[in-house]
Amino acid sequence: MKPSPVPPGPTDSGLQPPDIRPQDVRILVVDYHAFTLHIVESLLVKDGYAAVRGTSTLDEAPRLFREMQPDIVLIDLTPPKLDGFAVFDRLKAVAGGRHFATIFLSAAEDRAIRAEAYTRGASEFVLKPIDETEMRLRVRNQARAVAFERVLRQQNERLAQTVAERTARLQQAIDVLKRAEAQMSESLRASEAQGRERMAFLASINHELRTPLNAILGFADLLKDEKFGPLGGERYREAAVFIRDGAGHMLRLVNDLLNLASTEAGDFRLTMAPVDVTATVRDSVALLAEDARRAGVDLAVDILPGLPLIETDETRLKQIIINLASNAIKFTPSGGRVTVKVRTEGEKDLLILAISDTGVGISTEQMLDVMKPFGRVRQMKAPAAMAGKQGTGLGLPITKRLTELLGGKLEIVSREGVGTLITVRLPLNRAP
């Protein structure tokens, strides 16, 4: 009888297993015929398979299986003395899920038996009488599969170990980040609490400072204007002017600190009402006309006709306009120009307030400094006409905060030696 063709092995998929080491492959042979046992064992030993054992009884097969934990099992299906399928079922029960290759041997070329063998999990099927070449190739084919499976198992184990190690390291990193995040959150909460307490303290102190400062200002005005008669000398009058200017600067600082403290502490109140933007802008700019005249700065207003009434806080809107326009005047040399322009942006429903100047400008490196409380730009020098009336360093931070409280956004574009453009975008909440 011609040997059956050898089925393709596991390497046909393109994966190449390592070289086969026959001495590492354990084989169990279960066959009722002692002669067949002898032939099969001799063939396998000849090919170098050192761990080969055989039995012809159903009861001994499970015991040998436990002892040697075979990789390949050859089982005879020829009745009547030995039920090969029963042997196979008992060995699977002993294996407990561990995979092993099975080669069924049968003297009957019955398609039903062959089909059942493969259905039950057969790896190979060999007809008796055994062809030596076919047997050796079939076993070698399964030995290659065993070697290939071992490599995959080892790779999977190493991969699982690597994944477990990296997962553990990742979890450690996550734990560190979580602890750091918790610490940062706690520090932030503590910092915010301290900031609120500090601002509340500043607000309380500022109220206490206002009363004596107003008194100093009042009496300095009396002396400066000589309300109770001549002071007896021009130097006394000059001293009264210095007192008055110094007290005025301190009062501006106190007022700015109070505004900053109120906005940061969260107790700032807005009074929303219909506001005529055109009138508010003109009134605000008019308050700065004398400062602009003394500084030799041209102060212009450009308002889009027909602006609607908007729902906002008029006092805070005036404060924004005055802060920005007065700052522009301070840092614009004589002969320069400050323009207050008001427009609407219909598509985005915004009111655009833009204050531009031809002043000293701000360098890119120090742009952030001007937005910090008490932040001043070193290169910024006010014109001589504004000497003695330098700002507190709080105007822009307060203005930015007021803009945000009104639901808007403040932007600065500046070039040193050319000028500055500050744009305030407020929601165009049209009042009825």
Image (cartoon, rainbow, N blue to C red):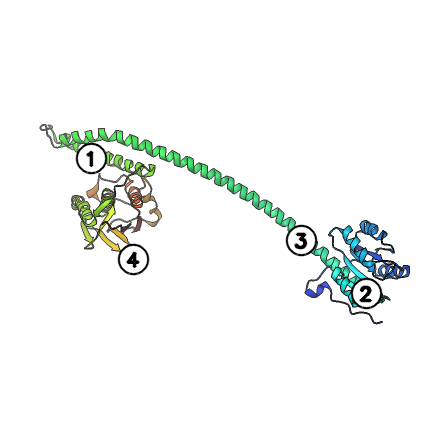
User: Real-space Cα distance between discs 1 and 4?
Assistant: 47 Å
Query: In which quadrant will I find the N terminus?
Result: bottom right
Q: Nearer the viewer, residue 121 or 65?
A: 121
User: Looking at numbered disc 4 in the image, what kind of residue is underneath it?
Assistant: Glu
Mark positioned earlier in the residue sequence (3 or 1): 3
**Could you tell me which secondary element the residue under label 3 belongs to?**
helix
Q: Nearer the viewer, residue 317 or 288?
A: 317
Mark positioned earlier in the residue sequence (1 or 4): 1
Q: Evaluate if marks 3 and 2 touch, with contact meaning CB atoms under 8 Å apart.
A: no
Q: Which mark is residue 347?
A: 4
Q: Toward which corner of the image does residue 322 lie, by quadrant?
A: top left
**Which numbered mark, 3 or 2, is in the foreground of this view?**
2
Label 2, on which residue? 126
**Could you tell me which secondary element the residue under label 1 belongs to?**
helix
Q: Evaluate if marks 1 and 2 touch, with contact meaning CB atoms under 8 Å apart.
A: no
Dot 1 crowding, Cα within 10 Å, few <14, some 14–19, many 20+? some
Question: Can residue 24 be seen by looking at this rendering?
Answer: yes
Mark positioned earlier in the residue sequence (4 or 3): 3
Residue located farthest toward the left when viewing the structure as drawn: 229
Label 3, on which residue? 156
Residue located farthest toward the right when viewing the structure as drawn: 35
User: Real-space Cα distance between discs 3 and 2?
Assistant: 33 Å
